[in-house]
Amino acid sequence: MAKNLKSGEKVTVDRVVEFDPKSESFINGLPQITAGQVGVVVDAAPQGRASIVDFDGIQATVSNQRLQRLETPPVKGKRGRKKRATTTASTKVKTANNVQKSSPDETSEQIITQLANTLLLNGGLKQNGEVVIQLRFDELPESVKTQIRKLIDAKLALSRTGMK
């Protein structure tokens, strides 16, 4: 059974269809349609669930239940809103470019402020939020660099003594 037939579509008949001798199709030279015969849909019939189909130049009205589409109709795009992408959005990388050299307390305060702002903007304070903040060592102020070097040296010294 073919549904929603449009004009120009090719259809076949799934069983023999015989016409009344008084019908237009019979008078025009089409006494019956055999199973598997190919025709082209011209239009929907005015009397319900039927279509007007052209078989070798002769038009006949055939029930849609007896018709089968010869080719599948092209798949149309779905209407509505697109689904959300499955990949997560890339996180923005923030550097310490705008940290100015000043006293150690003021520099530390600026870095902490910048980190807090980055977390707020990217949703890092949520329980499931993962925000990556990237800092380049050479962009840090000298006072912060020396503190980090001292911490690294102390940790390396601890790991060396723990290995003996």
Image (cartoon, rainbow, N blue to C red):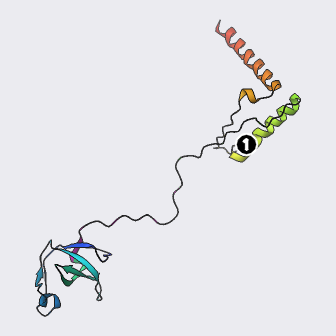
Q: Quadrant of residue 22?
A: bottom left
| Residue located farthest toward the right when viewing the structure as drawn | 103
Q: Which residue lies at the image location 74% right of the left edge and 15% below the top edge? A: 153
Q: Which residue lies at the image location 80% right of the left edge and 39% below the top edge? A: 113
Above or below, 79 relative to 142: below
Check the picture and name the quadrant holding the N terminus: bottom left
Question: As rendered, which of 129 and 92 lies closer to the eye?
Answer: 92
Residue indicated by mark 1: 118
Q: Is residue 30 left or right of residue 80?
A: left
Q: Amino acid at mark 1?
A: Thr
Residue 52 horizontal/vertical position (percent): 25, 83
Question: As rendered, which of 57 and 112 lies closer to the eye?
Answer: 57
Does residue 64 appear in this view? no
Q: Is residue 76 magenta?
A: yes
Q: Which residue lies at the image location 13% right of the left edge and 88% below the top edge? A: 28
Residue 32 horizontal/vertical position (percent): 11, 82
Q: Which residues are magenta?
A: 66-83
Does residue 29 appear in this view? yes
Count of marks placed on residues = 1
| Residue located farthest toward the front when viewing the structure as drawn | 57
